[in-house]
Structure formats: structure tokens, C-alpha cells
Image (tube, rainbow, N blue to C red):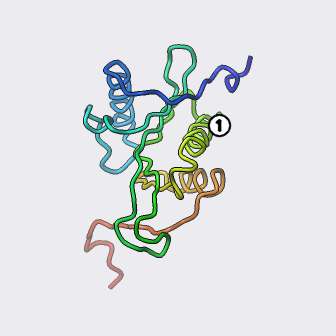
């Protein structure tokens, strides 16, 4: 049986055991050092969110969590008051990556919030922006809205 058939995607209510498991996974994510400034979660970071899991038996292969919001003011994308689902985190354990699990988590969450949200929004601070943009734009069909770039000031970089 392929891994695709063994992975079950579901929405779960947050309980103490699940929150502890997600905190442990976020510790692994922090250790990967793949995102600028990512720090492991605390219970308060997870509580109040909708949680979607990818599981193989008792093993959590990945998760997505986020919450509903309403636009506080009109933007170039949505009018004031527009309901949207803000993805806080989407993480797949390294040994489960490149198998479509992240896509399945996203699509499951999208289907779950359809009718409540008009948009799904997320931000990323990944260091591997090319792969992440490919994933979100090409594979999931998201649209690019804006970018916030940074450069550490270094006089040695100046051409003059």
C-alpha cells in the first residue's frame, strides 16, 4: 500500500495531548533552521486554532493550523469585513515530504472552511523561497499578493 493510501487527513479538536505533540513537532521544525526567526510553539500559539492533521496510524506526518479572521480595512485584494482563513503553520515532517501530504492538508483545510471564508491567506519566512513559492503558487494555485524583503546592511557589499 502506498504512503498516500496510508495517510489520513482529518480535523481535530485541540486537547492537551495533541497540543503537546504539535509543540514537539514545532521543536523539530525550529531545529531545522529552515525559516527566518521561527521559534517553537507554546500552547497559547496553538489554542483557538482549527487543527488539521496528516496521520499514519498514531504518527503525525504533518499539520496545518489556522483561524478565521475578517479584513479590518479594504485592501487591493479584499473589501473591509471580508472573511478569510489565516494559515498560521503548515508543516510536514522531513521523512514525509515530497509525497503530496502538504497539498492534501491544504486542500482539506480549504474544503473545511469553504462557505465560511472567501480567501485563504498565509505568510512565510522560509529560507527556501523558490521551493515554497513553487508549492504555494504552482501546486496549490495561490496568487501572489505582496512581498517583504530584507538585506542586512553591509558596507563591504557596496559597489562604490
Residue sitting at the far top: 58
- In the image, taking residue 159 as reference, residue 133 lies left or right, namely right
Query: In the structure shown, which secondary structural element does the residue marked by tag 1 occupy?
Result: loop
Residue sitting at the far bottom: 160
Quarter of the picture holding the C terminus:
bottom left
**The quarter of the displayed image where residue 142 is located:** bottom right
**The quarter of the displayed image where residue 20 is located:** top left
**Residue 120 position within the rendered picture, expressed as x and y whole percent measured from the top left:** 51, 54
- In the image, taking residue 115 as reference, residue 124 lies left or right, namely left
The answer to whether 15 is drawn above or below residue 120 in the figure is above
Q: Residue at x 47, y 41 (%)?
A: 90
145, 94: nearer the viewer? 145
- In the image, taking residue 30 as reference, residue 139 lies left or right, namely right
**Residue 48 position within the rendered picture, expressed as x and y whole percent measured from the top left:** 33, 38
Q: Which residue is mark 1?
A: 100
- In the image, taking residue 109 as reference, residue 126 lies left or right, namely left
Amino acid at each position: 500500500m502506498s504512503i498516500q493510501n496510508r495517510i489520513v487527513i482529518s480535523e481535530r479538536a485541540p486537547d492537551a495531548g495533541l497540543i503537546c505533540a504539535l509543540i514537539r513537532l514545532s521543536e523539530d521544525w525550529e531545529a531545522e533552521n529552515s525559516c527566518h526567526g521561527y521559534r517553537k510553539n507554546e500552547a497559547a500559539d496553538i489554542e483557538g486554532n482549527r487543527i488539521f492533521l496528516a496521520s499514519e496510524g498514531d504518527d503525525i506526518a504533518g499539520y496545518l493550523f489556522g483561524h478565521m479572521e475578517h479584513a479590518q480595512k479594504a485592501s487591493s485584494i479584499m473589501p473591509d469585513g471580508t472573511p478569510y482563513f489565516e494559515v498560521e503553520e503548515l508543516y510536514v515532517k522531513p521523512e514525509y515530504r515530497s509525497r503530496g501530504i502538504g497539498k492534501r492538508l491544504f486542500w482539506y483545510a480549504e474544503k473545511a472552511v469553504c462557505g465560511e471564508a472567501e480567501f485563504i491567506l498565509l505568510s512565510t519566512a522560509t529560507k527556501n523561497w523558490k521551493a515554497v513559492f513553487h508549492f504555494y503558487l504552482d501546486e496549490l494555485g495561490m496568487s501572489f499578493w505582496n512581498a517583504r524583503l530584507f538585506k542586512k546592511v553591509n558596507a563591504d557589499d557596496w559597489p562604490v
